[in-house]
Structure formats: C-alpha cells, structure tokens
Image (tube, helix red, strand yellow):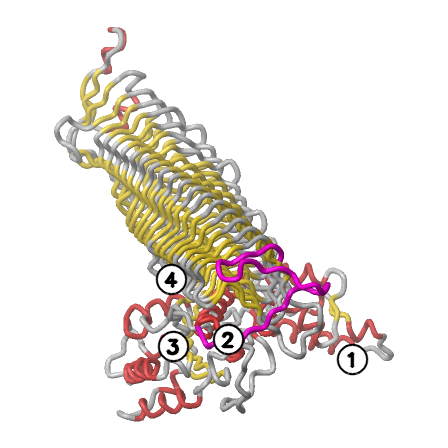
C-alpha cells in the first residue's frame, strides 16, 4: 500500500482537467494520466510494480532526492514503454530473475534516478527502446549494472555503476548504447562487455576501475569504440578481445593492471590511437592467433611491473606500431611462431632491461626508421625461419646491437649501432643475415663479430673506434665443411682501411684469437683457443630436448591456454639461461606454479612435462616428479609434520614437488591443525632450495584461491597461476578416439556423434572427472563390446575392433 499520494497536474485542454488531483496509488495515477501529464509523487515507499505506458512525467518532489522509493516485493519495480520523463526516484528490486528498471519501448528520459537493488539487472534496455539516461546511479551487488539487449540502444550520460555482482555494463543481442562521462566500478565481473554480432558499445570520457574481471571485454563479432576513457585497477586483463571482435581505443589510458593490459585472440582487430598503456603485470599488448591484428599509432607502452615482454605477438598474429614509444620494460617486443609479424615504424624502444626486439620460431619483424637505446640487446633473431628487416634504424647504448643465431636470416640495411658494450653485430650458431650499409661506432668489443663459419653477408659496412677491432671472423672448427664463412664486400674500418674478399672463389673466412668476454659465453660460440673439455660433474642430459617435450605437451587434447602459459614460461627461462651464459643480466623467473581446475584436466601430466622441460634446459638436475598430498606431509603429532615435509622435499631434489589438493593443508576450520606447520616448512624450504626444487600446488579453482589468499607467504613464492578448464564434448571425444587408436579399436559410423551427444548430456557435477571420465567411458565401451562379441561364433576383424553407439554405457 502506498504511504503517500500522487499529485497529477494536467497541462492540456480543459476537457481533461478532471484528471488533475490526488491519487492514492501510483498505479491509479498512471492509469488516469494521459500524454503530457505531470505526476509528482509525495515522499514515501510504494510497494507497487509500475508500468509507464504514456508520455507523462513521473517525478519525486523537488528538493527531496531519494524521498520516493519504488520497492515492490518481487517482479519489475518500474517498466517504461513510452517516451516519458522519469526523474528523482529511488528504485529498489529484489527479484533475481527480473531487472529493477526495464525500458522496453520509446525514447524516455530517465533523470537522477538511484537504483539500489539485488536484481538480475539494475537498468535493462531492450527491443526498440532508445532512452536518454542522465545522472543515474546503479548499486546492484547481485547482478548486472546496466544491460542493453536485443537491439536496444540509448545514451547514458554521467551515470555511475557503483557495484555489480556481474558485469557493470553488458551489451548483447544487437544492443548499441552510447555512454558519456560514466563511471563503472566495483563490479564482480567485467567492467563493460559487448558480445554477439551487431552488438556495439560506444564510450566517451568514461572510467572503469576496481573490477574483478576484465575492464573491457568485446567478443563474438561485437564492436566497441572507446574515446578518452580510463581503464585501471582490474583483477584480470584490462581489455580483452576474442572471436572476431573489433575495438577502437582513442586517447585512452590503461594502467595499474596485474595481468595483460590488452589481450586479443581469434581474429580480433584492435586499433589504438594516442593511447597510453602502463603499469601492467604481464604483457602490455598480447596478440594471438592467425587473423588477429593490432594497429597502434602514437601510443606509449611503459612502466611494466612484471617480467614479461611489453608487446607479445604469436600464433600467426600481426602487430603494427607507428610512431609509438615503448620504454621501461623487461623486453619491448617479442614476435614468435611462423606467420606472426610485427611492423614497427618511426618508433622508440628504450630503457629495456633485456631484449628490445626478439624474433623466433619462424616469425618476421620489420623495423623502419626506429630508435633503440639503453637495452641489453637491441634485436635478436633467434632461430631458423625467423627474419625480417631492420631499415634505417639506430641502436644506441646496448650490450650487443643485433644478434643472429641458429639459422635466422634477417636483412639489416642502413642501420647504425653506437657505443655497444660488447659488439655491434654478433652472428653465431648457424645464423645468417645480410648487413648492408651498416655502421658500428665506439664498440667496447668488436664491430662485427661472426663465428662458427656463419654464412653472413656484409656489404659496404663501416666500423669506427671499436676497442677490440672492427671485424672478427672466427672459424667454426674442423668439422665444418669448406665454402662456409661470411661474404664481405666493400667493407671498411678506421683501422684497416678496407676488407675485401680473397682471390679464392670461396667467401672470406678470417680466424682470430679471442679473449674471454661477455659474448664468449653466448650459446654456440667457439673461440679460436678452447680449453680441453672436462668430464661433466652433473648427470647426463635428459634423453629429450625441451622442444621434444613441448611437442608432447602440444599433442595433449585441449589445454590450449595451459600450453601457451607453459611455453611462455619456458621461453622466459630459456632466454634467461642464454643471457646468463652470455654474461648478461637475466630477470629472475620464479618457477613455482599454481595449477587450478577440476580433477582429470591433466594437471599431473603437465607437471611431469614441465619438470622434464626444466631439466632439458639445465634448470633442474633431474626433472623427475614427486607427487604428494596432505597425508604425505602432515603428521599426527607436533614435529612429525616438519620431518615428513622435509623428506618429501628431499625426494624431489633436482625435480618437481607436486602437491595435489594443496588447499587441504589450510582447512577453513583449521583450529590446531598441523597443516600450518607443513606450510611454514614448505615456505622456508622453497626459499632455501629455490634453485634445486620446483614446487607446484594444485587443486580446485575456488579452494586454491582461498588457500593462497589466507597464506600470503605461500602466494608470494609462486610466479603464476595456470587454470585448467574442463574438457568440452569434442575434447572428450578426441580422448576416446586416442584411447581407441592406442588399443587398436575403431569407432563405427555414428559412434562419434553418439559419444558427442553422450558427453554433452553427461552431468558435470562434482563427480565429473574430465579426461578420467573419457577414459572410463572408453573402458566401459570395451567391456560392453566384449560381452556382445563373445556371443559370436566366428567374429570378423571388424567385429573385434569396431565400437558401436550401443556400446555406450547408460547415463546415470
């Protein structure tokens, strides 16, 4: 029942003046009102579900904001289906299945509304509605702040989502709102999200912060345009694009992001103009997958807080940086994987702790008119198939200007390397490369240092004031065939005047004595005077290389994000190892990991492969896996827990200690539980033996988050958390197919589709075992097959090998 009255003032002709007066309820006033009427609501709480279907003005009393509360027990408190004006109301909803304010039709104006609710959405706009919403606030800790759905649109000006249990602003189903000078914060999901074809989001002068998901998320062919916006203080990535999403950022600021500032995948396209990206924990720009592209113009990426490259381009993606600045980062640009490409024009890469430009695994990078300075390595082309062009670039204040190794073959033209500490250009281990019209001045070592008989071509190059000499060509040794070595044409030095090819047809190969130096430790280099090899003091190397182990990892079904994480970590460790061998500083990489996810998602398998990879890289002595759980670490009396934990740690020496269900060490009702003693012992052992044992803790995602949050001493020891997602029906089917192939069975026609249907319908509750469930399903099919075939007198080969849909077990 209403606790106030409604004053209706009619502004039309005298024929309708009978509507002017007071009504006992809002519903009665709205029923009596016609277009143009003004309904002024007296202060009070109205337990009514209101529907505005005429172009009226519905407002609270002037000077008393918040004095009118629309608060029914359930349902939608306020529905607007006309071009009405609604102003100065306080709307409260309690229905988790309904919005608090629903706009379905017309072009209404919603002004100075405060929505405090626990509803599915605070404001929901759908259909053909195009509201103008000004100075409204939404506080909805149970659902979405603002939802624009099913072709809805409208303009939101100076609005604020102060809390949301899900996304702050959600656009889908072809919705297309415009937000101006709005603020979205304290959302438990994404700050702003747009998903689905024809969905579009435009934001101007908005701020998104303090959200527990990504700041902005655009997926599944949606588009978004953000101008002069701030995205900061998120828990996940700052901006996420996936599956043909298109986003434009102009004059925006993305900062204070613990993960990737911007992450693009699956053919998404991002255009950044005059945008700054700073204080990010992982990559500033992370670009993945064929067809994915980022174009950055006049942007600045700087001040990394983590140990990851500022710009990461992989899996066939493309990045274009034009007139950009990247500085104060561990590594500026990493391009890897065949088909990946980076084009950098008129840009500055500076204050880089490690490598400014790294090109590997068949990727390509082209730099034109760029300036690289104050980096450990200017550019490193790492391996076979990797290449590109450096054209008219300057490299200043590095340890080494350009490194080419392991079959990489870039073209370097009209580039200048000034004041390198060790060498201007260094080529080893089968690297190639063409250097034309390049110049090295003021080197602390050599200008051009080419060893191992590398087939490098130097044309019209010049060196000046190089401490150890302009050119150094060291032979590869007795096992290298003839006709190898650098080709040198019309190159000069302020010491030697010129270097010309010898009269013989084979290329110039010069061998010189070398003194130990920083470059003397780069992998693959052989000095002209080598000491005799000593017998290794360590155990022999693992039978497989890291690439072979990574190949097995790649062959696992699903786990794509896990594979990327492990490969990225492996690359960081490998680069650090090579840098240390080269006498360079290497960023400290914490190798301890957290694995989260449901049972049967491959956590133990990946842990085993990770240990083998670390052993192949020389990081661990053995790389073996020791798997333990609470029962192996926690004793029954005081003191026994520390002993058990130390014994487990000792067994894992040189390998990986894998602690499954680690959260059990810190139960919610711990009391005098001895699990804390195990944790304290682990923390100390991890610090004392950080170079000899890698620790991986694993368990369900929510439980592991709790475990790490209540044990900051443990959380600080781990470099990253890797999440193992549940397998989908197609992945479970692939596991069954692999099992069948391994055991010499075949799936009969129709069996694959039946399996897919079976796995789709299979309950995914606590008992769901992911890969284990797939294997158990295969075993059940084999048992039912055996029962069926055993009844045949003379089974054929097909009878013995084919599994049919009828062999599937019944769903529980």
Examine the rendering and report whether any part of residue 394 can be seen.
yes
Q: Earlier in the sequence, mark 3 or mark 4?
A: 4
Q: Are marks 4 and 1 in contact (CB under 8 Å)?
A: no
* Disc 3 residue crowd, few under 14, some 14–19, many 20+, Cα 10 Å: many
Image depth: mark 2 or mark 4 in front: 2
Q: Is mark 1 on a helix, strand or loop?
A: loop
Q: Do the residues labelled 1 and 2 touch (CB within 8 Å)?
A: no
- What residue sits 39% from the left and 47% below the top? 325
* Disc 4 residue crowd, few under 14, some 14–19, many 20+, Cα 10 Å: many
Q: Which of marks 1 and 3 is nearer the N terminus?
A: 3
- Asked where in the image residue 704 lies, by quadrant, the reply is bottom left
Image depth: mark 1 or mark 3 in front: 3
Q: Are marks 2 and 4 in contact (CB under 8 Å)?
A: no
What is the x, y in percent for residue 466? 45, 63
Reading the image, the residue beneath label 2 is 514
Separation of disc 4 and disc 1 at Cα?
A: 68 Å
Q: Which of 569 and 430 is in front in this view?
A: 430
Image depth: mark 3 or mark 4 in front: 4
Range of the magenta residues? 489-517
Q: In which quarter of the image is the N terminus?
A: top left
Which numbered circle lies on residue 662?
Answer: 3
What is the x, y in percent for residue 460? 58, 52
User: Farthest residue in the right direction?
Assistant: 794
- What residue sits 19% from the left and 24% below the top? 40
Reading the image, the residue beneath label 1 is 790
Q: What element carries label 4?
A: strand
Q: Is residue 736 left or right of residue 271?
A: right
* Residue 506 within the magenta-colored segment of the rendering: yes
Reading the image, the residue beneath label 4 is 353
Image depth: mark 4 or mark 1 in front: 4
């Amino acid at each position: 029942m209403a606790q106030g009255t409604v004053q209706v003032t009619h502004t039309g002709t005298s024929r309708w003046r009978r509507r002017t007066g007071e009504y006992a309820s809002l519903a009665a006033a709205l029923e009596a009102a016609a277009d143009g009427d003004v309904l002024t609501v007296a202060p009070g709480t109205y337990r009514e579900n209101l529907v505005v279907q005429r172009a009226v003005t519905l407002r609270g009393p002037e000077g008393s904001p918040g004095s009118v509360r629309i608060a029914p027990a359930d349902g939608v408190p306020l529905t607007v289906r006309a071009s009405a004006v609604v102003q100065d109301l306080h709307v409260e909803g309690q229905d988790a299945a309904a919005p608090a304010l629903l706009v379905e039709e017309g072009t209404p104006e919603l002004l100075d509304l405060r929505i405090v609710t626990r509803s599915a959405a605070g404001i929901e706009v759908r259909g053909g509605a195009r509201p103008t919403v000004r100075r409204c606030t939404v506080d909805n800790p149970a659902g979405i702040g603002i939802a624009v759905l099913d072709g809805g649109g409208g303009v939101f000006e100076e609005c604020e989502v102060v809390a949301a249990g899900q996304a702050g602003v959600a656009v889908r189903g072809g919705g297309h709102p415009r937000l101006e000078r709005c603020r979205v914060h304290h959302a438990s999901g994404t700050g702003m999200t747009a998903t689905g074809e024809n969905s579009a989001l435009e934001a101007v002068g908005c701020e998104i912060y303090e959200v527990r998901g990504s700041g902005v998320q655009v997926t599944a062919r949606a588009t978004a345009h953000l101008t002069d916006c701030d995205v900061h203080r998120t828990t996940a990535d700052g901006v996420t694009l996936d599956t043909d999403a298109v986003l434009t950022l102009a004059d925006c600021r993305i900062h204070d992001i613990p993960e990737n500032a911007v992450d693009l995948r699956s053919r998404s396209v991002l255009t950044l103009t005059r945008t700054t990206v700073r204080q990010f924990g992982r990559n500033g720009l992370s670009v993945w997958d064929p067809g994915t592209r980022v174009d950055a113009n006049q942007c600045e990426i700087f001040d990394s807080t983590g140990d990851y490259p500022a710009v990461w381009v992989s899996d066939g993606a493309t990045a274009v940086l034009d007139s950009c600045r990247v500085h104060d980062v561990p590594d500026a640009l990493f391009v890897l994987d065949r088909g990946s490409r980076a084009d950098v024009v008129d840009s500055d890469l500076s204050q880089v702790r490690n490598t400014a430009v790294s090109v590997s695994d068949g990727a390509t990078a082209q730099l034109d008119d760029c300036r690289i300075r104050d980096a450990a390595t200017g550019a490193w082309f790492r391996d076979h198939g990797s290449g590109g062009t450096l054209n008219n670039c300057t490299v200043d204040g590095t340890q080494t200007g350009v490194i080419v190794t392991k079959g990489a073959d870039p073209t370097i033209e009209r580039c200048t390397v000034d004041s390198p500490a060790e060498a201007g250009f260094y080529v080893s281990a089968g690297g190639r490369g063409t250097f034309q019209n390049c110049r090295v001045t003021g080197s602390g070592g050599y200008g051009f240092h080419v060893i191992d008989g590398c087939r490098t071509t130097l044309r019209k190059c010049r060196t000046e004031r190089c401490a150890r000499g302009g050119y150094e060509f060291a032979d590869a040794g007795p096992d290298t065939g003839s006709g190898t070595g650098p080709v040198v044409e019309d190159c000069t030095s302020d010491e030697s005047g010129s270097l010309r090819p010898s009269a013989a047809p084979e290329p110039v190969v010069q061998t010189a004595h070398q003194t130990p130096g920083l470059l003397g430790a780069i992998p693959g280099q052989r000095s002209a005077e080598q000491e005799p090899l000593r017998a290794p003091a360590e155990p022999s190397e693992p039978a497989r290389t890291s690439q072979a182990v990574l190949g097995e990892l790649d062959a696992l079904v699903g786990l794509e994000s896990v594979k990327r994480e492990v490969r990225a970590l492996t690359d960081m460790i490998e680069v650090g190892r090579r840098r240390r061998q080269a006498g360079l500083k290497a960023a400290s990489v914490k190798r301890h990991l957290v694995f989260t996810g449901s049972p049967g998602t491959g956590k133990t398998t990946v842990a085993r492969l990770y240990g083998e990879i670390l052993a192949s890289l020389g990081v661990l002595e053995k790389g073996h896996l020791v798997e333990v759980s609470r029962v192996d670490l926690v004793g029954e009396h005081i003191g026994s827990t520390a002993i058990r934990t130390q014994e487990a740690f000792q067994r894992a020496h040189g390998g990986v200690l894998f602690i499954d269900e680690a959260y059990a060490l810190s139960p919610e009702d711990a009391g005098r539980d001895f699990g804390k003693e195990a944790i304290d012992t682990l923390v100390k052992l991890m610090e004392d033996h950080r170079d000899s044992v890698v620790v991986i803790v694993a368990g369900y995602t929510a439980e592991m988050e709790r475990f790490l949050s209540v044990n900051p001493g443990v959380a600080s020891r781990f470099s990253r958390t890797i999440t193992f997602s549940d397998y989908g029906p197609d992945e479970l089917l692939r596991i069954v197919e692999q099992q069948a192939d391994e055991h010499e069975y075949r799936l009969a026609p129709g069996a694959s589709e039946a399996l897919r249907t079976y796995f789709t319908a299979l309950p995914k509750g606590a008992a769901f075992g992911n890969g284990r469930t797939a294997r158990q399903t295969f075993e059940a099919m084999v048992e039912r097959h055996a029962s069926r075939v055993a009844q045949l007198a003379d089974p054929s080969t097909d009878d013995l090998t084919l599994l049919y849909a009828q062999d599937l077990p019944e769903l529980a």
